[in-house]
Image (cartoon, rainbow, N blue to C red):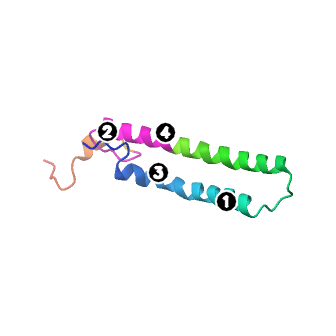
């Protein structure tokens, strides 16, 4: 077993949050370099606080949800698709096996 926190499948699950994080980073850079609002420092601080808090919250949420997904994947030995129970998996058997 590897020592990595997230395996490849978990990283693919979490990659959906990369685009919103990149958009937030673009807004931060845009607000810093273009400054479309008046030079009032209070407006700039409020802008950066709103975008920054949302970005940090999204990053933290992504990290902890990845840890939970990874922990739960390691805890379960068998894979049961969403919407099915263990009883359904036992009844259906393994694909390709012939029932007697």
User: Which mark sits nearer the N-terminus, 3 or 4?
Assistant: 3
Is 2 or 70 nearer to us in this picture? Answer: 2
Residue 88 placement: quadrant: top left
Outermost residue, top direction? Answer: 75
- Which numbered disc flags the more N-terminal residue, 1 or 2? 1
- Judge from the rendering whether residue 92 lies leftward or rightward of residue 44; answer left or right: left
Between 11 and 36, the one lying in front of the other is 36
Image mark for residue 74: 2
Q: Is residue 83 above or below residue 20?
A: above
Residue where numbered disc 4 is placed: 64
- Single out the mark in the foreground, 3 or 1: 1
Horizontal and vertical percent position of residue 72: 37, 37
What crowding class fits label 1: few (fewer than 14 Cα within 10 Å), some (14-19), or many (20 or more)?
Answer: few
Q: Label 3 to label 1, Cα distance in Å? A: 24 Å
What is the magenta range?
63-83
Q: Residues within 10 Å of mark 3 (few under 14, many from 20)?
A: some
Secondary structure under tag 2 reads: helix
Q: Nearer the viewer, residue 38 or 2?
A: 38
First-in-chain label (1 vs 4): 1
**Distance from Cα at disc 3 to Cα at disc 2:** 17 Å
| Position of residue 48 in the picture relative to residue 16 (left or right) | right
Q: Residues within 10 Å of mark 2 (few under 14, many from 20)?
A: few
Do tag 3 and tag 4 residues touch (Cβ < 8 Å)? Answer: no
| Residue that badge 3 annotates | 14
Q: In which quadrant is the N terminus drawn?
A: top left
């Amino acid at each position: 077993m590897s020592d990595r926190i997230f395996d490849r499948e978990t990283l693919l699950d979490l990659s959906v949050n990369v685009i919103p994080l990149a958009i937030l980073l673009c807004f931060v850079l845009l607000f810093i370099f273009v400054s479309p609002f008046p030079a009032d420092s209070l407006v700039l601080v409020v802008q950066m606080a709103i975008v920054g808090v949302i970005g940090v919250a999204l990053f933290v949420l992504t990290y902890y949800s990845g840890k939970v997904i990874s922990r739960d994947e390691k805890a379960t030995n068998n894979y049961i698709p969403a919407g099915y129970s263990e009883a359904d998996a036992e009844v259906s058997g393994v694909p390709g096996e012939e029932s007697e």
